[in-house]
Image: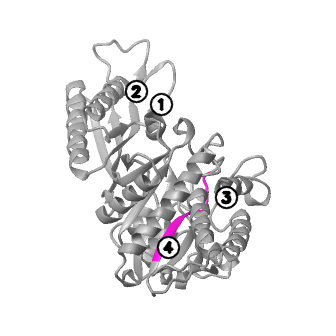
Amino acid sequence: MSRAKERCDSLGEGRFTDMPGLLFRPYLGPAHKAAVEQLTAWMEEAGMSVRLDPSGSLIGRYEGTGMKTLLIGSHIDSVKDAGRYDGPLGIMLGIDCVAALHQVGRRLPFAIEVVAFGDEEGSRFPSAMLCSRAMAGQIDDKSLEIDGLEGALNDWGLDRASFLNAKRDPADLVGYIEAHIEQGPALEAEGLALGIVTGIAAQKRYSVRFVGIAGHAGTNSMALRKDALPAAAEAILKIEEIGRAGPPDMVATVGRMEVLPGAPNVVPGDVRFSVDVRAGTAEPRDKAAEEIERALAEIAERRGLGLAVRLLHDLPPAPCDPAMMERLERAVTAIGQPVHRLVSGAGHDAMAFADMTPTAMLFLRCEGGISHNPLERVFPADVDLARDALLAFLDILSEEYDG
Ligand SMILES: [Zn+2]
């Protein structure tokens, strides 16, 4: 039981990591190559024909009676000092579903392709989800102008010129489904093994800078100083308040701050920090982002400070497909589990496909909500439930499939 979990565990060490003592499997590195070899063996054993696509994603195909294809995907790369399940678990569950069909010689009215994306985390190059975005046709040649990418591709017998040929034709696809650990504490708090993702959150990220005047901490009286740090402190509390006032799926975070010049005897003249705002839909996020911008301007004005606010990125929400979600709900019900819907606050490969083909995501509970950390844990029984839910989903999709 829980072969999928055991397989993730076995990919957590030895030649499957590029750093001794911790798990680090960056895109197109030696550990990625070793993982591709191992996955190839497991995919072939499950009855799939296996190929590497032009972006370095490994694809195992199990033919159906019809020509169209359902993609079951997730990523095989990892962050530095990663857990063992973020990414690989979704691939192993896909392989186990195909293995179950293959074992009884069953063919569905569509082919299944299990996809192990090479880059999701962006831990080798300063660009994330290169492989899924290439497959979904979301990147252009310009986004491949990345130092070192060409050489890394060549090492694998791939080349940059054909990278974009990884793009799939949506007319050939039935849809995309991904199983992934939640990477948050919501399912555990509800006592649930599984959750149905309604969509991936809309995200805005800013860099903010308050500029005052640096001066001697002993000689600048409280009345006369232009201290940038209390302004930032006030702003951070306000950002938290705005985040709390939003819907339950709203989050607002200041995760990084730099205080300059950064000495105990100097009034801070320059403080820079990040603001990250997310919500399931764009409207409440944008409302919160506007409120935050107004609050920052008010604080700077009142305190006589300079203010610079720069929007770094603005990602639209990636909603899951209602019909696919509803089938997944029936699948979860069919295996005796309660239906619980939730928004994904984290980005996933699925978001690249949401505009291209009907997309669904299944979340699995992870202990303590801990992820991107070697302490990442899943419960074996939950992994088995996820496999059963995916198999029930394939049954339902096959019954309702009309080519
Ligand atoms: Zn992931």
Image height check: is 203 above or below 320?
above
Kind of residue at disc 4: Leu
Q: Position of residue 297 (x, y in %)?
A: 22, 35
Sequence-first tag of 2 and 1? 2
Kind of residue at disc 1: Pro
- Residue 144 is marked as 4
Question: Label 3 neighbourhood size at 10 Å, few (<14), some (14-19), many (20+)?
Answer: many
Q: Secondary structure at mark 3?
A: loop
Task: Give the residue drawn at x 45%, y 87%.
Answer: 66
Q: Cβ(mark 1) to ligand 1 < 8 Å?
A: no
In the rendered image, residue 236 lying in the magenta stretch gets the answer no
Quick check: marks 2 and 4 in contact, CB under 8 Å?
no
Residue highlighted by disc 2: 214
Image height check: is 47 above or below 268?
below
- Residue 25 is marked as 3
Q: Cβ(mark 4) to ligand 1 < 8 Å?
A: no
C-alpha span from label 4 to label 3: 20 Å
The residues colored magenta run: 70-79
- Position of the N terminus, as image quadrant, is bottom right
Q: Nearer the viewer, mark 4 or mark 1?
A: 4
**Residue 235 relative to residue 47: left or right:** left
Kind of residue at disc 3: Arg
User: Which is the main secondary structure of the residues drawn in magenta?
Assistant: strand
- Residue 261 is marked as 1
Sequence-first tag of 4 and 1? 4
C-alpha span from label 2 to label 4: 42 Å
Q: Cβ(mark 2) to ligand 1 < 8 Å?
A: no
Sequence-first tag of 2 and 3? 3
Quick check: marks 2 and 1 in contact, CB under 8 Å?
yes
Kind of residue at disc 2: Ala
C-alpha span from label 4 to label 1: 37 Å
Question: Label 2 neighbourhood size at 10 Å, few (<14), some (14-19), many (20+)?
Answer: some
